[in-house]
């Protein structure tokens, strides 16, 4: 009997040792790569790093006794810096996961490297539909939103209000081109027309010539296919030109709660937007956002909330799989529903798109906000299957049938 117990104990010890040995390099290392100093710093930046740390802390900063480590870097909105950082992280620093990466050009570069090197890529910041379309990866997961969802929300809502003539002002790089394309397709599919477009450099300070072209077009809606401080600068300058007062509508096709905070509700009131997360949506979102605000001194954007959700889901998958092997973890992530403060019954499709409800929101008038940061009125919930492209139509080669 004693011999049997001793043998059983040795077997259990061996099994435990084997399970722990499956965590490569003795740790789980996550790299948060984003804009920490430029136009997207407020919507991602240090807030995304804080969100990733919150997810790690929820796991006790360890899995099976192996530490979870978070590292951060600034890609400066340059694809080559994003690519070089990712290579160095993987080749020299044993990074297992790259997270966030706002700026679609940077994200497309990172997607190629993580695909080739078999590393998980958790995308909360970038919007290009190519990331879960023709450029999809077995290791890539697009989490918080994409440009189709923005068009399906804000674009559809305004066209259905009878505002069918559009002029689109676009950031001249991969993200802006994608958002312009998805919005134009949505407008035309609903019987509207795009009467003109103009493209501006990333981080331009002066939108006057572009806004004058849009104003002269006679469009019902001027759609802003940009984000971050580009969007807020365009909105501020549009207000100076009196564009909305003259009867044209302004549509921020990708706006964040930090943008509204920067603009002030007096300027932003009435703007329609689409979001994957709002801090005041329910008890779970309020509780998590309160913790986040204590650390970040601001309410979270959907990108920052998405970083937390994606990192949390990844870490839970590592724990459930008993390994950080990328193929096994990716499979576990796909088979496990996402249930947290970000998404209820979210699901990950074969193309890496995480399907979850989106929300059409309107910016409240200042008098209607009872507490700080209570900027949004949720107009309607957009079900996941309406918010995102059907995987079979995404162009992703991983989708069969």
Image (cartoon, rainbow, N blue to C red):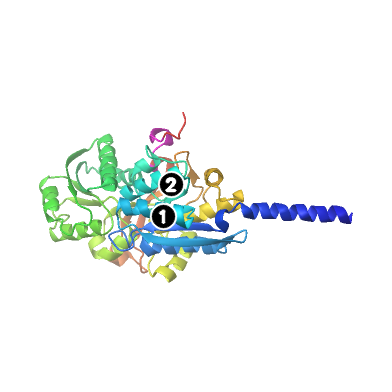
Image x and y of residue 290, in percent: 45, 67
Q: Main secondary structure of the magenta part?
A: loop
Q: Position of residue 130 (x, y in %)?
A: 35, 41
Determine whether the residue tagged by mark 2 lies in a helix, strand or loop: helix
| Comes first in the chain, label 1 or label 2 | 1
Q: Which mark is residue 88?
A: 1
- The relative height of residue 312 versus residue 389 in the rendered view (above or below) is below
Q: Is residue 260 left or right of residue 85?
A: left
- Residue 342 appears in the picture as rendered: no
Check the image and report above or below for 63 versus 387.
below
Task: Name the one closer to the observer, 121 or 22.
Answer: 22
- Outermost residue on the top side: it is 401
Viewport quadrant of the N terminus: bottom right
Residues rendered magenta in the picture: 387-396
Mark 1–mark 2 CB contact (< 8 Å): no
User: Would residue 4 be visible to someone looking at this image?
Assistant: yes
Membership of 153 in magenta stretch: no
Q: Position of residue 281 (x, y in %)?
A: 43, 58
Residue 388 belongs to magenta span: yes
Residue 343, image x, y percentages: 47, 52
Q: CA distance from mark 1 to mark 2?
A: 12 Å
Mark 1 surroundings within 10 Å by alpha-carbon count, few (fewer than 14), some (14 through 19), many (20 or more): few
Q: Quadrant of residue 25?
A: bottom right
According to the image, label 2 marks what residue? 114
- Residue drawn where x is 39% and y is 33% of the image: 393
| Mark 2 neighbour class, 10 Å CA radius: few under 14, some 14 to 19, many 20 or more | many
Q: Residue, x 23% and y 53% (percent of image)?
A: 202
Q: Secondary structure at mark 1?
A: helix
Residue found at x 40% / y 46%: 113
């Amino acid at each position: 009997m004693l011999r049997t117990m001793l043998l059983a104990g040795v077997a259990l010890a061996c099994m435990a040792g084997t399970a722990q040995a499956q965590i490569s390099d003795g740790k789980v290392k996550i790299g948060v790569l984003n804009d920490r100093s430029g136009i997207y710093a407020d919507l991602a930046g240090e807030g995304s790093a804080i969100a990733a740390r919150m997810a790690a802390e929820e796991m006790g900063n360890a899995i099976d006794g192996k530490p979870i480590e978070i590292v951060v870097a600034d890609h400066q909105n340059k694809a080559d810096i994003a690519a070089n950082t990712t290579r160095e992280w993987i080749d020299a620093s044993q990074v297992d996961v790259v997270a966030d990466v706002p700026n679609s050009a940077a994200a497309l570069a990172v997607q190629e490297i993580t695909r080739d090197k078999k590393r998980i890529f958790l995308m909360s910041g970038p919007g290009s539909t190519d990331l879960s379309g023709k450029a999809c990866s077995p290791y890539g997961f697009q989490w918080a939103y994409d440009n189709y969802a923005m068009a399906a929300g804000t674009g559809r809502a305004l066209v259905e209000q009878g505002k069918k003539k559009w002029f689109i002002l676009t950031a001249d790089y991969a993200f802006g081109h994608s958002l312009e394309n998805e919005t134009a397709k949505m407008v035309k599919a609903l019987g509207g027309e795009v009467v003109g477009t103009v493209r501006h450099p990333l981080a331009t300070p002066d939108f006057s010539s572009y806004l004058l072209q849009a104003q002269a077009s006679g469009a019902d809606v001027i759609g802003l296919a940009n984000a971050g401080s580009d969007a807020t600068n365009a909105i501020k300058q549009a207000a100076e030109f009196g564009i909305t007062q003259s009867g044209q509508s302004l549509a921020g096709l990708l706006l964040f709660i930090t943008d509204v905070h920067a603009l002030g509700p007096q300027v932003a009131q009435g703007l329609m937007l689409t979001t994957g997360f709002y801090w005041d949506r329910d008890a779970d979102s309020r509780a998590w956002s309160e913790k986040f605000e204590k650390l970040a001194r601001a309410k979270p954007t959907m990108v920052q909330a998405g970083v937390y959700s994606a990192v949390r889901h990844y870490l839970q998958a590592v724990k459930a799989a008993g390994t950080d092997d990328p193929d096994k973890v990716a499979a576990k992530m796909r088979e496990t529903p996402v249930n947290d403060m970000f998404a209820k019954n979210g699901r990950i499709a074969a193309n890496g798109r995480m399907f979850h409800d989106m929300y059409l929101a309107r910016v409240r008038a200042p008098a209607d906000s009872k507490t700080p940061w209570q900027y949004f009125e949720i107009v309607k919930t957009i079900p996941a299957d309406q918010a995102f492209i059907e995987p079979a139509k995404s162009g992703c080669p991983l989708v069969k049938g």
